[in-house]
Image: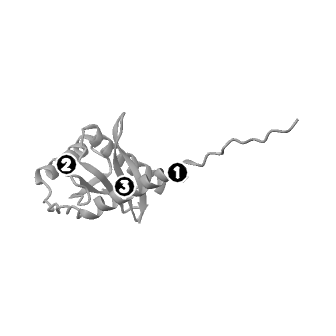
Amino acid sequence: MKAKKDTQKIKAPLSNSWWVRLLSLFMIVILAVSCGSEEPAAIPDKPLERPDSESITELENSINNIIRERDFDNATLDIISITADREMPDDYYLAQIYFDFDARESLATGSGIMRRNSDIILGLLANRGVSTLKEASVIWNDDYNNRTLQFDYRYRNGRRQNRFSITSIKEK
């Protein structure tokens, strides 16, 4: 008996078909014509608006009310500075809250007290629904230990809760 040769025809891959090549070329030409014929749309510049002075006043009043309600021992409020965040499209603000720390505590104890007070202030702001304040820094001038501590926070809008999270601690 003779052995039969396998005479099945091997099919060429789909990319070798002439109609696939023609269709691909046609699509490339259409895309090139449609993209090249239009000029990019000009994006109008949004004028820089002055921050709403009422919003800034409301934020300052909220911070002042929290500080008065809590009556932080050995801490004196120095300055509250609120500025508009020009990088954000809406009315978002940045706050810097300056305190003088009057306690005669060690470095570690003083740092703990200052951090706890900063956490309380910003936690109460978040609980009161202050969502236009995106970043805040609480700066403490500690004359006894001859240093300045800065606690930086960022507002987090979460599913379960809105809160401020600490992003950095700087000592000068």
82 vs 59: above or below: below
In the picture, the quarter occupied by the N terminus is: top right
Left or right of 126, for residue 91: left
Q: Which residue is mark 3?
A: 152
Amino acid residing under circle 2: Leu
Q: Residues within 10 Å of mark 2 (few under 14, many from 20)?
A: many
Q: Nearer the viewer, residue 99 or 62?
A: 62
Provide the secondary structure element on which disc 3 rests.
Answer: strand
Please say whether residue 62 is visible from this viewpoint.
Answer: yes
Tell me which amino acid carries mark 3: Asp
Q: Are marks 2 and 1 in contact (CB under 8 Å)?
A: no
Position of residue 31 relative to residue 10, above or below, is below
Quadrant (top left, top right, bottom left, bottom right) of the C terminus: bottom left
Q: Image point 21% across, 61% down: which residue?
A: 41
For disc 2, the marked residue is: 59
Which SS class for mark 2? helix
Residue 13: image location, x then y, percent: 58, 48
Specify the label residue 17 is tagged with: 1
Is residue 101 in view? no
Q: Secondary structure at mark 1?
A: loop
Identified by mark 1, the residue type is: Ser
Q: Nearer the viewer, residue 163 or 125?
A: 163
Q: Earlier in the sequence, mark 1 or mark 3?
A: 1
> Dot 1, crowdedness within 10 Å: few (<14), some or many (≥20)?
few
Residues under numbered marks 3 and 2 in contact, where contact means CB atoms less than 8 Å apart: no
The crowding category of the residue bearing disc 3, from other C-alpha atoms within 10 Å (few below 14, some 14 to 19, many at least 20), is: many
For marks 3 and 2, give the CA distance.
Answer: 17 Å
Residue sticking out furthest to the top: 160
| Residue at far right of view | 1
Residue 49 pos. (x, y %): 13, 59
